[in-house]
Image (cartoon, rainbow, N blue to C red):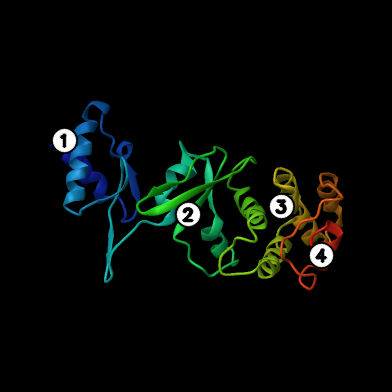
Amino acid sequence: MVVAAKVKDVLSTTPEGVVLTIQDFGIEPKNQPTLTRYLNLLVEKDVLKKVSKGRYYKPRKSQFGLLPPSSTEVVKDFLQRGGKTIGYITGATAFAEMGLTTQISSSIMVGTNKYRSPITRNGIKISFLAQTNPITTKSIPLLRILDALKLIRRIPGTTPDECVVVIQKLISSLSAKEQKSLVVYAAKYQPSVRALLGAILESLETYELLQPLRMNLNGVTSYKLGISATVLPTKKNWNIV
């Protein structure tokens, strides 16, 4: 009865669609097997839905049926731990928010400092993008821009040319300090990303940031990125073909 009362209390203050873990119910470890059985009973009664082992949510009802939790809720254990940011949503989901594509993705990509194999959770495929830069609230928007440059030929529902136009606007709207950080973070990406960032910065006449990018590029290597000279006239200066 104590477990049932505690669960009822927690659920009464938890919004629909928020994913809860076993720890969120504040039950002593010795009583957690009882808690798990009770939560699974609520799943059978459709009071709760199960995302994965030990992770549950109250479904929100609509005229089309029960709605799943948001992408952020599905993967939030990969984004935050102990109040610390450990990952971020990137890929098509983030690129749509950035205006790079209008295509809705059925999968989620998470940038993380720790390599993980792809998994499926709640019917959603979750992949992971290795990120060696620090992941913080301030760095995430910049890392997403660099991820877009890295994946520019794989962004669905758009072309590299269309992406470059949007990314140019995003970079031009950054402060001088943010642009400098972007260059610092780019040092840990592959050469094609650094070359593309250099060409975009040169097109924006941000010449003072170009030298660090040039220093780490091989002058005889070319990068085939499917970007036209019409959209990015400076591409030839960075061996982009």
Q: CA distance from mark 2 to mark 1?
A: 37 Å
Question: Quick one: SS at disc 1?
Answer: helix
Q: Please name the amino acid that badge 4 sits on.
A: Ser
Count residues near mark 1 (Cα–Cα under 10 Å), then give few for <14, some for 14-19, many for 20+.
few
Q: Please name the amino acid that badge 1 sits on.
A: Val
Question: Comparing marks 4 and 2, which lies closer to the viewer?
Answer: 2
Please name the residue that numbered disc 3 is placed on: 178
Query: Where residue 108 is drawn, which disc sits there?
Result: 2
Q: CA distance from mark 4 to mark 1?
A: 65 Å
Question: Quick one: SS at disc 2?
Answer: strand
Please name the residue that numbered disc 4 is placed on: 203
Question: Quick one: SS at disc 4?
Answer: helix
Query: Where residue 2 is drawn, which disc sits there?
Result: 1
Q: Is residue 115 left or right of residue 59?
A: right
Nearer to the camera, 60 or 8: 60
Q: Are marks 4 and 1 in contact (CB under 8 Å)?
A: no
The mark that comes first in sequence, 2 or 3, is 2
Name the residue at 19% across, 48% down.
42
The mark that comes first in sequence, 2 or 1, is 1
Q: Position of residue 212 (x, y in %)?
A: 83, 46
Question: Quick one: SS at disc 3?
Answer: helix
